[in-house]
Image (cartoon, rainbow, N blue to C red):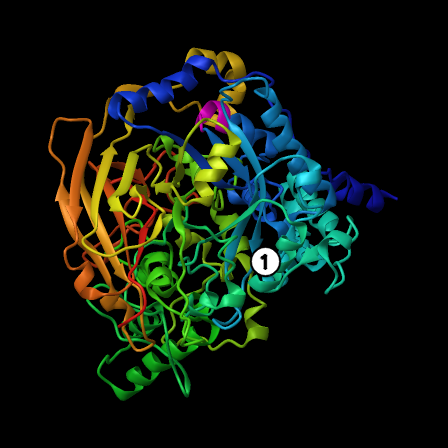
Amino acid sequence: MLFVLAFWVVYGGGKEQYDGEIAQVALAPEHVAARAAGQTRAAPNATDRILFGDLHVHTTLSVDAFMWSLPLMGGEGVHPPADACDFARFCSQLDFYALTDHAEALNPRTWKMSRDSVRQCNAVAAESVQPDVIAFTGYEWTQVGLTPEEHYGHKNVIFKYDTDDELPARPIAAPGLAARAFSNISALWSLLTLPVRAFPEQQGYLDFARHIRENGKHPVCPENVNSKELSPTCRERAATPDVLFRKINEWGLDTIVIPHGSTWGFYTPLGYTWDKQLRANLDDASLQRLVEVFSGHGNSEEYRSFRSANFTADGMECPQPTDDYEACCWRAGEMIRERCDDAASELCQQRVEKARADYLRVALAGHVTIPGEDVPDWNNCGTCTDCYLPAYQYRPAGSVQYMLAKGDFENPEEPRHATMGFIASSDNHSARAGTGYKEFARLQMTEARGAPSESWRKSMFGDRGQPEPESTTYTIATLMERPPFELMWMERQASFFITGGLVAVHATERSREAIWDAMQSRNVYGTSGDRLLLWFDIKNGPEGVSPMGSELEFTGTPKFEVRAAGSFEQKPGCAPDVIQALGEDRVERICASECYNPGDHRRRITRIEVIRIQRQRSEDEPVADLIEDPWKTIPCPEGPELCVVEFEDPSYGELGRDLLYYVRAIQEPTPTVNGGGLRCRGGECEPCYGNFRTPVDDDCLVETEERAWSSPIFLLAGPEP
């Protein structure tokens, strides 16, 4: 009886997640009016209004977000859907946002909770003709494949309306790694010791275990049945994008699908390319109107020719380093070389080659093959060192530039190319929509998390042991015996998490319809978090002036105009009415006591960079030769708030091929959380850890140039002569 009682005291009482309570007061109208006034002052002749939002926001309904919230990760507790609404309304003061929790982590109860929370958020300002914030419902399809052939990546699915009859009965998940991790009861075994170790602060772990159990108890829906005919209590899955698109289209709802994280090497296999997703059956152009170019997980814009691994008839090979890139498999060999008594010996070279092969064999968990290694030992391996705030373990053949340049020639008579507008968002996992309004609170406003002490660190990541002269050879079976957190290399990732970006839309009015229309027409752009204003137009299109996102048949010399203004410098703290509306405790809890609080001075736009991409016309055209980045760089004059530049391309007609143009507006340097990545200089690195190894109050600020990316303008030259 004593044993049963003790077991219940430690392990009993896990609670369901809840949706939280939304503050039943709107943001003061003067704040909403000030947003429009600031734009009017900078660009008085603008005929549209720019609205800022975040279309990639997770709450702790997502299992990974719940895990980050636990004490073992230095977390601050759960952040339910209500927090997303209050944060967007009062902390970041966005114009719109979307909830996009992982479909693999949602069940019938929590999917209803997510839908209800969005409606409750919208209801606060439902009677206003100028609502302070507009909330959208969505989910993330989180697909992960172990090989490049099986991998498709992550996509956010967002719906226009918020009523039950205009939303699907279920989200659609991807089977595989994410689904198993988020709902498989076997994942609980690793949690059994945590409540005992944490007692009497074990409640969060019990709730986490219950959340996984709740997800796992619902049956998987039968395949090959129309989505509208399935039971509302089953969990629907789509293994590939074509199945996902088919199921979405069966509902006949207004929907947008946004790929993201396509260069982030945390889950993307070595050697991955976007190529197969250009095929007609794997790309629904009516749904995939947009792509996420930047988030709190880094930049996915830029293409480079390096690869993390080369594929040959005999398998994978480790590529040799260049001046700008070193693959981590190569670095593994060099770490072993440094441990040799005689670095020039044949035995040493054999050990070096073995280390590279051992790393490639287990790919994403390759770091565990080097005994006694630590994060700084790996230097900048796997990093795009000349990219702007690159995603972790960069996969350039998944970059947005590569997507747009590459063609699919499965049908040589009708080659296909991707045609998508650019957005950015946060990918925040603590219900904080639009975290980039100020560069502060690294452990709250980014995804950087980690163990609070050395003892917790060893229990999570394992004991790396002492340096040995030879690498360890793992099979999949022996690899799975390692602690699961160790395999994820989470300590190294923490240096790459940033506060995230925003999507901006050119809207005719402040409404749900206008925001959606702008996204559908691709008249949108992304920013790295600051609220830069940006217009990009072709002045002499077939029907006159046409905005970013346009796709036009064109002959002659295209002429373009760019207008850009920097973001407002921020005042400290929060406005008094915000504190009054939320209360000091909630402002501290969800806003970390800082809000969007603009002053009167705009930061300067220093230059406009123009990128020109030629669309691949045959399979043998090297993609790198088609991407001209930058094609032009145009300085902005000092003084005016609004930078206005014009340019044209006389060579367009001579090329006689389809091209696209987009621009980057570059702002003067300002401090950025984790702006230096691993902070490597002269072969020495000082990672910015998410755990106790970096002080909590160190935001790892390094100056970077915040920016905005316009959506491209696509010009069609017609068939080859």
Query: Would you say residue 718 is visible in this rendering?
Result: yes
Q: Which percent across, then down, holds residue 387?
A: 26, 54
Q: Which percent across, then down, holds residue 596?
A: 39, 24
Please check the rendered image and state whether residue 509 is part of the magenta-colored stretch, yes or no: no
**Front position in the image: 467 or 451:** 451
Quadrant of the snapshot with the C terminus? bottom left
In this picture, residue 391 sits left or right of residue 23? left
Residue at 50% over, 72% down: 147
**Front position in the image: 504 or 65:** 504
Provide the residue span drawn in magenta. 88-94
Residue at 24% over, 79% down: 343
Q: Amino acid at mark 1?
A: Phe
**Front position in the image: 484 or 134:** 134
Examine the image and state in which quarter residue 572 appears.
top left
Relative vertical location of residue 718 with respect to residue 439 in this rendering, above or below: below
Residue at 26% over, 23% down: 44
Query: Would you say residue 294 is visible in this rendering?
Result: no
Relative vertical location of residue 424 with respect to residue 395 in this rendering, above or below: above
Q: Which residue is mark 1?
A: 245
- Circle 1: element type: helix
**Front position in the image: 210 or 504:** 504
Residue at 56% over, 62% down: 241
Quadrant of the snapshot with the N terminus? top right
Q: Which percent across, then down, holds residue 635?
A: 12, 41
**Mark 1: few/some/many CA within 10 Å (<14, 14-19, 20+):** some
Relative vertical location of residue 17 with respect to residue 187 in this rendering, above or below: above
In this picture, residue 301 sits left or right of residue 174? left
Q: Which percent across, then down, holds residue 656?
A: 23, 65
